[in-house]
């Protein structure tokens, strides 16, 4: 089999599985559906490994599959770009997807939509692979929207729940706002570079850099990059387009792991990395990226502090980590961003699937206030979740340590506008991350066993959860949680391994060895941060040992200790703090009022505007005045002329006399 | 034989309709099978137009010319180029679907119903292939009659108001077109469209002709602010009527712009372009907001049609290849997608007899197959990539950004609005728990309905994944048109 066929096989195998499971789900049954889709993803994963080895042997590829459209000088082709950045993404996507497929057998075992679910997640895998393997902007946008569609379908998977179908519409709409910017960015590229092919566009970047945005004195490239980044803000949930991600937790947990943690939400990070030759030309755009990312990293992390729904804690942590990746992009540490993307994919998928395992053990109760002491009952989930949490807070030697510490150091070394603010955010974020991660860990796995009590007492105080109470089953009094079946815990174990070791193994080549080669471009003269980092890097062992005496480590440990003190030692303290700092608590509880603002300003505002235009414009002005008005005018004229024909002789005679007088007057005055 | 293809495309459906009237007035089954056979025959005769089309040639192909009214040099003159050919195929394809869609639903006067659509189809093919001004005008006006009858006889409770509004609105416009044609005849002593393309005219006559054409075509498109007949017509029309109205009849106005306004009076067209672009953007944005708040599904899709047609007029008046070809692609795609949207609403209406969004909810629980297809078309209506709905919007936005960034910016707002009105409706109608007893009793689509929607879904997907062949046939003619429009015709 030649390599080109193999490239095609990577995305098409999951697509085939998806189509079979989706269209013939009823015929092939549950087992048939998961066998065919898992087989598809497995083939895709193995093919990715083969492609990886081929790329390592030095064979990259950039070529077309077919011509999609030719018009107006644009020649748009569907095609693949296979380089190290692509192949790394392919491995991450197919591996995590495979784990999630296996896990789903256990998680969705009792769901009536079993086959549909497998069809969706395989379709997602196809779309995501098309996105990362693209060699042009159009196919990127195709994949971009296709993953958005599948995300829409999966968030609304349980379509009878009002919260789920609210959340999926919201997710789609917010992403569309991002896509709006993205498409305009693509439009500018098409207009000024005359092509949508990556290589052609990047080859013309020097030309683009000299151009000015029409009608202003802004640099064109800055406008392009900011437009593209708005797309990334939607997909990668950066402030203020982050609002959809917490709500997306309405979807089943396996997709929270696959789509809303490991892969789809990182598409924005991947995209900006791909576009690094363009972003490197605009410091303004990079500063914009940096500030947005830093804000997301810290302020979304803060919201994680007060969540009680186990999935929402992980969701806010994902937002915050995406912020870290974006910060890395802002300081031109693209390889660090992608490196963190990879480690995060493993440990965050692990944390989500672990949370899902807890949810199964708790009989679909997601409220951490009903948990506690689960370590005893669910040992595998407990250990793997601990591994995930340690990786997340950046404990030395764990995968997250290498990637996160590199980002922090890169920010410290950077001199771009906004780097100071960003450094504060990421360093404060370390403490916050450690605190909420271990708050969750302690509340779930240690301390007093709070499950098996009367549920309703706990739900009453949280209106949002009350609405979804129908799926909060929970444990009956006296019932104990239990470890989940092997299809659920095996993926946890398989994800825990890279969560520990992948950073140690790969940091040297990926971050400091120019492994990505030409896939990532950095202008080292203007943005020397990564170069400085590489000078100070003396191997993964030295870095980890140094990590034990660094500021981030102390902050993380402080966070862990404080959460231990608050949630295990003195559980009454958090409530007291919430009372003392009531306004702050209310602000956090309302998520900085983003949702309220959007609901009132955008959602209700557009409805008001629409109704106003419809009633005042269409009905009153156009139809009322002009259309029916002219009909009425014709009617009046008819009525008026009808009055002339009254049938009374004297009226006719009278008007004849007036007419004669009128004509005579004209006649005499004609000269 | 091959030179009579266009005549066949026109007269096979029309003569077939007469056969349906005669043979099928007593027996419904005969009427519909016969109608289906005629529609399929009509589709078959148009296929050689595509396969035998010479895409390297910009001029008219499959030309037929014979004198008609010698005294005024009026000819029976037919021909198609890369711009018009696809619409004949689209029209013949949609006619087959409309016949299938009316299979069991229409209970009264089925032969007449089917016949009206077949006649309509033949007349539409006449409009798209006529190269003589008077011949065009005759087809153009004659097509009003079947549509007027379809709405007026098989329509909803307020059908008479709607039919009359439709008729008067469009008739008033086209009378001015006739005046313009007569003026052009007096200048050129011919009704030959191709000679009109070469006619030199002063600026003021150009402007007056442009205005006359504008009033006629803008109503048909429909452009803001002469669009208000469309929602009324759609709401009252039977499903098949809405499909033909949206899929084909709306294309006539836009076709008029490319066939008449742009090449005959290019200087006036350039002069009026800022206004046309402005009106198009108003249609896209203003109507997008209006569509969001509609409570009646047919009205919502009707408004969304106005918004989508705004893309077509925008594409024409930015005068670049991407824009014009994008507009043509958008016209074809809109034929598939809006047709499918109206068919989907028809499927639900047949079961519940309501078009109100509020009367539905949770349809997916009882009609899962339908829900999947409906979602596909809803996504196409919101312009999702890999559906045909994306291609035209994408090309026009690309063209608009090239023309002026802020024009593209305004047009791209449709990405947000289109998704908002379509998916919000979809959410309220399809998702959720079963809302009421009517929804609980809905049965999923039958094989015939599945066939109709499935064929459209294949068309939408194929055009989304591989638009190349569609635009490939246009290139030569569109380039020729743009070259033509770029040269001044002032005396």
Image (tube, grey):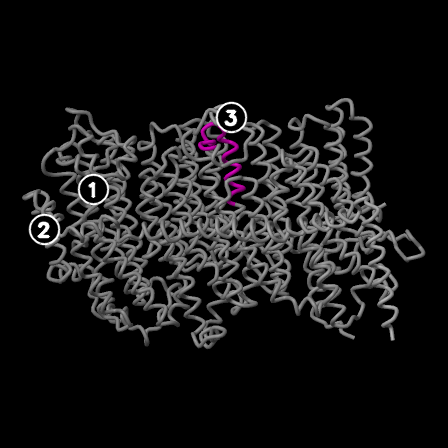
- Tell me the chain of label 1: A
Classify 10 Å Cα crowding around label 2: few (below 14), some (14-19), many (20 and above). Answer: some
Name the residue beneath numbered marker 2: A562
Q: Is residue B371 magenta?
A: yes
Q: Nearer the viewer, mark 1 or mark 3?
A: 3
Which percent across, then down, holds residue B160?
A: 68, 38
Q: Secondary structure at mark 3?
A: loop
- Residue under the point 71% across and 45% down: B167
Q: Between marks 1 and 2, how big is the CA–CA gap?
A: 18 Å
Name the residue beneath numbered marker 1: A308
> Looking at the picture, does residue A142 appear above or below residue A440?
below
- Is the magenta region chiefly helix, strand or loop? helix
Q: Horizontally, is A34 left or right of A613 in the view?
A: left
Q: Secondary structure at mark 1?
A: loop
Q: Between marks 1 and 3, how big is the CA–CA gap?
A: 41 Å
The single residue placed furthest to the right in the displayed view is: B71
Q: Where residue B442 is drawn, which disc sits there?
A: 3
Marks 1, 2 in one chain? yes
Residue A3 shows in this picture: no
Quadrant of the rendered image containing residue B260: bottom right
Among the two numbered marks 1 and 2 on one chain, the one whose residue lies closer to the N terminus? 1
Magenta residues (range): B360-379
Quadrant of the rendered image containing residue B325: bottom right
> Looking at the picture, does residue B395 appear above or below residue A495?
below
- Tell me the chain of label 3: B
Classify 10 Å Cα crowding around label 3: few (below 14), some (14-19), many (20 and above). Answer: some
- Residue under the point 29% across and 45% down: A349
Residue A490 shows in this picture: yes
Which percent across, then down, holds residue A340?
A: 28, 56
């Amino acid at each position: 089999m030649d390599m080109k066929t193999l490239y095609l096989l990577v995305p098409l195998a999951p697509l085939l599985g998806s189509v079979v499971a989706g269209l013939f789900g009823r015929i092939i049954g549950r087992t048939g559906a998961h066998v065919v889709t898992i087989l598809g993803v497995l083939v895709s994963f193995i093919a990715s490994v083969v492609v990886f080895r081929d790329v390592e042997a030095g064979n990259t590829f950039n070529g077309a599959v077919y011509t999609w459209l030719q018009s107006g000088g644009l020649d748009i082709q569907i095609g693949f770009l296979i380089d190290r950045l692509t192949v790394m993404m392919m491995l991450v996507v197919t591996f995590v997807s495979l784990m999630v497929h296996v896990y789903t057998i256990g998680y969705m075992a009792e769901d009536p939509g079993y086959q549909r679910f497998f069809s969706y997640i395989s379709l997602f895998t196809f779309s995501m692979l098309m996105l990362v393997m693209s060699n042009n902007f159009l196919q990127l946008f195709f994949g971009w929207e296709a993953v958005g569609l599948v995300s829409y379908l999966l968030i609304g998977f349980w379509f009878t729940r009002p919260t789920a179908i609210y959340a999926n519409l919201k997710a789609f709409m917010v992403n569309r706002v991002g896509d709006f910017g993205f498409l305009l960015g693509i439009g500018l590229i098409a207009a000024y570079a005359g092509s949508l092919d990556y290589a052609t566009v990047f080859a013309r970047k020097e030309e683009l850099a000299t151009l000015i945005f029409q009608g202003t004195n802004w640099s064109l490239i800055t406008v392009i990059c900011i437009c593209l980044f708005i797309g990334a803000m939607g997909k990668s949930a950066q402030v203020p387009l982050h609002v959809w991600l917490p709500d997306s937790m309405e979807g089943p947990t396996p997709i929270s792991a696959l789509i809303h943690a490991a892969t789809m939400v990182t598409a924005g990070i991947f995209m900006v990395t791909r576009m690094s030759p363009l972003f490197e030309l605009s410091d303004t755009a990079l500063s914009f990226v940096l500030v947005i990312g830093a804000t997301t990293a810290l302020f979304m992390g803060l919201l994680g502090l007060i969540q009680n729904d186990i999935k929402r804690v992980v969701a806010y942590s994902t937002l915050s980590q995406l912020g870290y990746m974006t910060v890395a992009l802002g300081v031109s540490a693209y390889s660090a961003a992608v490196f963190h993307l990879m480690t995060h994919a493993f440990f965050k998928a692990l944390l989500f699937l672990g949370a899902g395992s807890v949810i199964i053990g708790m009989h679909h109760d997601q409220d951490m206030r009903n948990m506690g002491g689960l370590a005893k009952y669910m040992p595998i989930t407990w250990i793997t979740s601990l591994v995930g949490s340690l990786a997340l807070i950046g404990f030395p030697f764990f995968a997250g340590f290498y990637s996160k510490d590199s980002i922090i150091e890169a920010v410290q070394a950077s001199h771009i506008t906004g780097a100071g603010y960003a450094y504060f955010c990421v360093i404060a974020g370390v403490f916050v991350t450690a605190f909420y991660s271990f708050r969750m860990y302690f509340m779930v796995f240690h301390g007093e066993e709070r499950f098996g009590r009367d549920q309703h007492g706990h739900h009453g105080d949280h209106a949002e959860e009350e609405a979804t109470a129908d799926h909060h089953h929970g444990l009956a009094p006296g019932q104990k949680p239990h470890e989940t079946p092997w299809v659920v815990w095996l993926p946890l174990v398989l994800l825990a391994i890279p969560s520990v070791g992948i950073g140690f193994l790969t940091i040297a080549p990926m971050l400091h060895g120019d492994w990505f080669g030409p896939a990532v471009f950095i202008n080292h003269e203007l943005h020397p941060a990564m170069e400085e980092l590489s000078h100070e890097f003396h191997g993964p062992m030295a870095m980890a040992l140094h990590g034990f005496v660094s500021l981030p480590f102390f902050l993380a440990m402080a966070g862990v200790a404080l959460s231990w003190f608050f949630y295990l030692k003195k559980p009454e303290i958090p409530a007291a703090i919430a009372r003392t700092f009531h306004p702050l608590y209310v602000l956090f509880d309302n998520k900085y009022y983003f949702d309220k603002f959007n609901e009132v300003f955008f959602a209700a505002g557009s409805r008001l505007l629409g109704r106003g235009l419809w009633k005042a414009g269409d009905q009153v002005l156009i139809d009322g005045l002009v259309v029916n008005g002219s009909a009425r005018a014709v009617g009046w004229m008819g009525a008026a002329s009808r009055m002339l024909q009254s049938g009374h002789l004297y009226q006719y005679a009278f008007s004849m006399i007036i007419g004669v007088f009128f004509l005579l007057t004209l006649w005499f005055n004609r000269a | 034989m091959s030179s009579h293809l266009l005549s066949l495309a026109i007269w096979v459906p029309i003569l077939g309709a007469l056969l349906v009237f005669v043979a099928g007035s007593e027996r419904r089954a005969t009427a519909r099978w016969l109608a289906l056979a005629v529609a399929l025959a009509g589709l078959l005769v148009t296929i050689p137009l595509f396969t035998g089309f010479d895409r390297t040639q910009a001029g008219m192909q499959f030309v037929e010319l014979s004198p008609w009214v010698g005294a005024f040099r009026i000819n029976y003159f037919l021909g198609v180029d890369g711009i018009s050919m696809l619409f004949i195929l689209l029209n013949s394809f949609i006619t087959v679907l409309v016949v299938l869609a009316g299979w069991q639903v229409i209970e009264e006067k089925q032969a007449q119903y089917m016949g009206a659509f077949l006649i309509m189809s033949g007349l539409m093919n006449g409009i798209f292939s006529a190269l003589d001004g008077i011949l065009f005008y005759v087809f153009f006006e004659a097509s009003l009659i079947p549509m007027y009858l379809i709405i007026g006889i098989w329509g909803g409770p307020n059908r008479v108001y709607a039919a009359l509004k439709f008729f008067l609105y469009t008739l008033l416009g086209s009378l001015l077109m006739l005046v313009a044609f007569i003026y052009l005849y007096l200048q050129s002593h011919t009704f030959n469209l191709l000679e009109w393309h070469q006619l030199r005219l002063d600026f003021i006559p150009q402007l007056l002709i442009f205005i006359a054409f504008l009033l006629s075509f803008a109503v048909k498109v429909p452009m803001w602010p002469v669009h208000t007949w469309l929602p009324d017509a759609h709401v009252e029309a039977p499903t098949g009527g809405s499909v033909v109205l949206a899929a084909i009849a709306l294309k006539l106005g836009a076709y008029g712009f490319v066939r008449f306004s742009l090449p005959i009076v290019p200087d006036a067209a350039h002069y009026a372009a800022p206004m046309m672009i402005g009106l198009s953007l108003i249609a896209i944005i203003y109507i997008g907001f209006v569509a969001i708040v509609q409570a009646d599904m047919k009205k919502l899709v009707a408004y969304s049609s106005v918004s989508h047609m705004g893309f077509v007029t925008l594409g024409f008046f930015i005068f670049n290849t991407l824009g014009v070809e994008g507009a043509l692609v958008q016209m074809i795609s809109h034929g598939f997608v809006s047709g499918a949207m109206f068919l989907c609403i028809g499927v639900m209406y047949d079961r519940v007899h309501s078009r109100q969004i509020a009367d539905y909810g949770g349809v997916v629980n009882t009609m899962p197959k339908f829900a999947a297809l409906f979602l596909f078309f809803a996504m196409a209506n919101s312009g999702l990539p890999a559906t045909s709905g994306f291609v035209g919007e994408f090309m026009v936005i690309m063209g608009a950004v090239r023309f002026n960034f802020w024009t593209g910016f305004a047009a791209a707002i449709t990405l947000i609005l289109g998704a908002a009105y379509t998916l919000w409706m979809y959410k309220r109608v399809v998702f959720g728990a079963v809302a009421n007893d009517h929804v609980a009793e809905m049965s999923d689509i039958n094989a015939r309905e599945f066939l109709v929607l499935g064929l459209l879904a294949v068309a939408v997907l194929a055009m989304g994944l591989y638009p190349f062949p569609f635009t490939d046939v246009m290139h030569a003619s569109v380039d020729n048109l743009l070259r033509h429009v770029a040269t001044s015709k002032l005396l």
